[in-house]
Each structure stands twice: as C-alpha cells, then as structure tokens.
Amino acid sequence: MGVPRILVAGAGIGGLALAQALHHGGLDVTVFERDPTPTIRDQGYRLHIDPDGNAALRDCLPAPALAEVHRTSGVNGDLVASYTQRLEQVMAQTFPDVSGADVTHVDRNAFRQGLLTGLGDRVRFGRAVSGYSVTGSGRVRVEFAGGGGEEGDVLVGADGAGSAVRRRLLPHAALRDVGLRCLYGRMTIDDTTAALVPDDFARGFCWVGGDRGEGAGFAPVFFRERPAGARDYLMVAFVAGVARLGVPDQRLFALPAADLWRLAAGICADWHPALRALVAHADPGSFFPITIRASEPVGPWRPGPVTLLGDAVHTMPPAGGVGANTALQDAATLAAELIAAARGERSLAEAVGRYERVMLPRGFATIDRSLAMIGQMLGSPS
C-alpha cells in the first residue's frame, strides 16, 4: 500500500490535532474548513485543557507546534471554585504545582493558530464539505458546497455538531437540546478593569450559581506571550434555561451583541456588586449565544473509509471543557491507528474499526459525565 491520503472535514481542535499527527507521521493529509480565514468564529473564548488533553497534544503535535501552543497559552491557574450569587464560597480546589510543562487553559483563537503551525497549504479554508460518496474502488470522494470535490482513502468528519459527514454516514444520529442556552462574553483586563477582578477569579475557573436555576462561569486568560492583537481578558459565560432567559430562540439568536450583554446584566441584576461590575465592564460587542446540546448514543457501525471525530459524533455541553479534551483524545487515537496502517501493520478499515471501538464508548461516557456536571452546577437534573 502506498502512502494513504486522509481527508479531514473541519479545522477545529480535533481536526487540526489529527492533521498534525498524520503529517508528522508521513501521511498525506488535507483539511477542508468552511471558515473563510483561520480567525475563529463565535464558539467560545477560553478552553480548559486537562491531563488527558495534554497527553493527546504531546502525542499529536511535533515540537514546534507544541511549543507555539504552550507559548500562547494562558498562565496556569491554581484554583477551581464555586460561589453563591452573594459571593459566598461554596467549594474550592487548589492546585499547588502549576509550573510544569502542561497547559491548563488556552484562548480558542490562539490555540487554533498554534495548531496550524507548520501545516501550510494542507489546510484549505473556504472549502465547506457538504457530503461524500464512496467510489467503486472503495475510496471516498468529498463534495464541496461550492462545487467540485476531491478523493482520498479515508474521510474523517471533524466538522462539529452540524456535521455534514455525520448526516450522510449516520442519518439516524440525533442531537438533543438540553434546554439550556449560554451567553458568552468577556471583559478586557487592563489598568482600569484589573482592580475589579476578585482575587480568586484571577486564579482560575470560578462558578457562580444563582437562585433560579441559572449560573455563570468566570475565568481569566493571562497570556504567557500575547499573540498579535490579543489582550488579557476575563471570560464570562452565563448558562440558563430558556424560560429563565425569557427570550425565545428566534429572537435570542437575532439579537445584537450589545443586547445580549444587557440581557446578561439583567440576569445578575440582584447579584453581589462585585459580580455585577464584571458584567457592567465587559465588552458589549463580545457577547453571543449558543444552544447547549448533547448527542444521543449511537451504536457501532460497520467500519469503512469514513469515520467521525469530536463534536461530529459526540457533541456535549461545555462543562469542564470535556468536549475539547475528548476531541484531542480522538485525534491521538485515530492518528496512531492510521499511522500503523500506513506501516502495513493493519488495513485502513481495521485501523478505523479499532479507533471507533475506543472512541464511541469513551465519547458517550464523557457526555454522561458532562450532563451530570452541568446539572450539579445549576442545582438541577440534566
């Protein structure tokens, strides 16, 4: 078998980590991304990277890319805590050794830039994969929304919760709306606003639970080295049920950013003054909403030249950053299998099947933990 050509739909976290590992392993890999440029769209700001995610990064990234991710990551924090809306501490967990080589969190946009290090034209932006077909020879041809297509030996759908690849491969797979919406925003930390950040909130992720089933996460990003144009900031993420927001989806997702900022301020109108100040000084143009969804479990399918990775197969709530870390684990597992196949140790179909037997139970077990976590954070069942 010659060097297999791997096509990846989606230049998100998992797709780029996979591309790095495959390229470094000598495989021919091309990533197709619908975004017109590498600048991230509205998906969130700060991502937590846990020990599993760090291990996967080490497995996937060559030294220059790993160094760039570390250089532009946030300074490691040493606290995870929760509070009432009156700023009374409920729980705190400290991490005394935060000086190691691992990262605890990254800015999503800086992370993507780091993951692109060295990939060059192997990532093609402005190319949305709309579907695929399996050829008579058993290869796979991707089709682009704007017309045209390309052929490879394996297609990996890493194209997120709205995956076109999943719709073709698993038309029965379903996403469940868990009834929660998240309003993301951020407050730039500068000479004026730094004094507003409570000491604990500058040390790591802090969750504030409200009295009516809502809550908000606050977490800083102090860059080790600021990428061009970046500024340190405090992420704000309000989570609430549709009824608590009081705005139907059709209107919520059409609201200008400044109106979403005012909506967030209204949610915490009776919270502690220090919390209200953080929202009052947030950047009005930084707010956007997302729907929190979770994939319904799917059973195994017959392995072939098409597989899935990350949110494309196991979408989960953003609690604890488990989605990003699971996508990184998927990338490391799949890359190892495909590289082994390229060495002649197994067929490509066997490699894909071995990956799926690990990925599926791991991903859906993580969804269960994520749903349980967000239920605990909001003081209600998931």
Image (cartoon, rainbow, N blue to C red):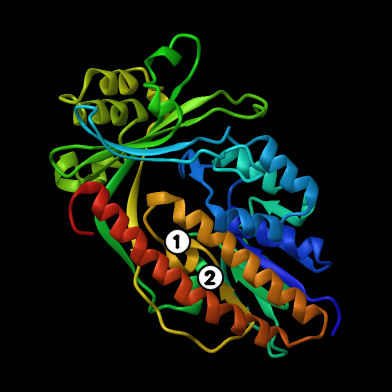
Picture layout, residue 95 above or below residue 85:
below
For residue 371, above or below residue 281: below
Q: Position of residue 121 (x, y in %)?
A: 78, 52
CA gap, disc 2 and disc 1: 9 Å
* Residue at 30% over, 31% down: 260
Is 171 placed above or below 162 here? Answer: below
Q: What's the residue type where badge 2 is placed?
A: Val
Which image quarter is the C terminus in?
Answer: bottom left
Residue found at x 84% / y 85%: 1
Number of numbered labels in the structure image: 2
Q: Is residue 145 visible?
A: no
Image coords of residue 263 (percent x, y): 24, 30
Q: Which quarter of the figure has residue 135?
A: bottom right
Q: Nearer the viewer, residue 143 or 92?
A: 92
Residue found at x 51% / y 35%: 77
In the structure shown, which secondary structural element does the residue marked by tag 2 occupy?
helix
Q: Which residue is mark 1?
A: 162
Q: Is residue 119 left or right of residue 222?
A: right
- The disc placed on residue 165 is 2
331 and 84: which one is in front? 84
Disc 1, SS: loop
Quadrant of the image occupied by residue 40: top right
Name the amino acid, label 1: Gly
Q: Residues within 10 Å of mark 1 (few under 14, many from 20)?
A: few
Residue 137 image position (x, y, % from top left): 73, 89
